Image (spheres, helix red, strand yellow):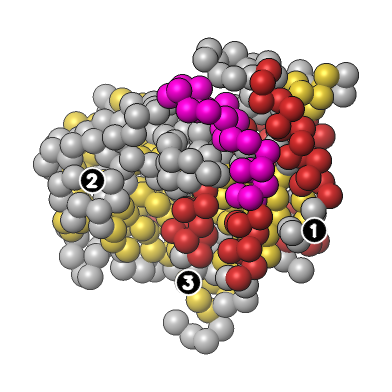
Amino acid sequence: MSDTTAWVAGFRSAVISPYEQVKLVESRGFADETVRQVLHLAGGGAQFRVHLTNLYGRTPLVIGAARVALAKTGSEIIAETDTVLRFDGADQITIPAGGAAISDPVELAVAAGTDLSLSLYLPEPTELATLSHQPSEIAYVAPGKVAAVPTLAAVEEVPVRFFVTGVDVLAPADTPIAVALGDSWFEGVGSTTSANLRSVDALNSRLVRGWAVNQGIGGNRLLTNEIGVPGLDRFTRDVRSVPGATTVLINFGINDLILGGMSGEPPATTDQLIAGFTEIARRAHEAGLTIHAATIGPYAACVYPGMPIEETLPTRRQVNEWLRTTTLFDTVFDVARAVEDPTRPDFIAPTYDCGDGMHLNDAGHRAMAETIDINALFA
């Protein structure tokens, strides 16, 4: 590596524990199976390396074989690009419970928008897997040691990502990286699966310099555990530890207001949310990062039962008015106003509603991305 290049994040995937009380999907374990996963790169470089995780595992994770290739379609890979993924020269690795591993560099140039296909053979029972639970992408699971097979047969398709947290790329050392830290409006819920039309993807299509990596977790809250650890607590793990990070975008609030209804917790108050936003802005600036905050999107038509909708809408309005006037952030991008129904601003406009009253469709994700001032992002 020369002084003009550095390892920076080219892809990220934020993970949660499979043992949480509040669950939107169930995790699973593996035994004598291969899981093949598509990783869509936000940025490219002359080489890359892969981050694997057993963060929430309760037993060691045995990787019997790991391979990476350029993806073709579905579970199919471009066979001539297939290569063994090694760890300190070995083609197998055991990751301890709570641990992580970074692969050796792969001598293959990749570009922004490249889809890598990561195949992991898991020979021994894994118990429940550390996962990214709503990635808007498919994992392909097949029996046996078939990591090197160009097209997997008899696959089970699972809309979840397992055991992987990122890809680093060897890029120019001055490449700026934005980290999108937030909830489902970043992770991509409501966008078309396997189409890379999440709000963060749409933002990347607008950038001419640098890129944004996605650390969204559907259901994540700024202040409270589950789903995932709180955004405030994730800041160190999922922002400061991201190589090359120069700025952070945050999108929180809906889940702080209504998700607690699933487990009998009270909604966050206006004062609590403002204090949380104030603290995360302080941490970002203390770390030398710029920070750009989204207003809290509309959710009055939410179809999911047990959510405290009507009683939390006044809090949403109060926090949004504070966000629009505060000077704590480098910029505030007004997602709420961009996607609301002008005649009923607590509701997502039908044009942007994926159908559940609280998540965006493809057009909504693009509208969200278009509210971000790209000139300010890497200023």
Q: Amino acid at mark 1?
A: Thr
Q: Is residue 27 left or right of residue 166?
A: left
Could you tell me which secondary element the residue under label 1 belongs to?
loop
Between circles 3 and 1, the one closer to the viewer is: 1
Task: Please name the residue that numbered disc 2 is placed on.
Answer: 57
- Seen in the picture, residue 368 relative to 42 is either above or below; the reply is above
At 57% across and 50% down in the image, what residue appears? 181
Disc number placed over residue 206 in the picture, else none: none
Quick one: label 3, few (<14), some, or many (20+) residues within 10 Å? Answer: many
x then y, percent, for residue 3: 52, 87
Q: Between tags 1 and 2, which lies in front? A: 1
Residue at numbered disc 1: 327
Q: Secondary structure at mark 3?
A: strand
Q: Residue 191, percent across and down?
A: 60, 30
For the N terminus, give its image quadrant.
Answer: bottom left
Q: Residues within 10 Å of mark 1 (few under 14, many from 20)?
A: few
At horizontal 76% and vertical 68% (from top left) the residue drawn is 379
Q: Secondary structure at mark 2?
A: loop
Query: At label 2, which amino acid type do we have?
Result: Gly
Q: Which residue is mark 3?
A: 7
- The stretch of residues the image draws in magenta is 255-277
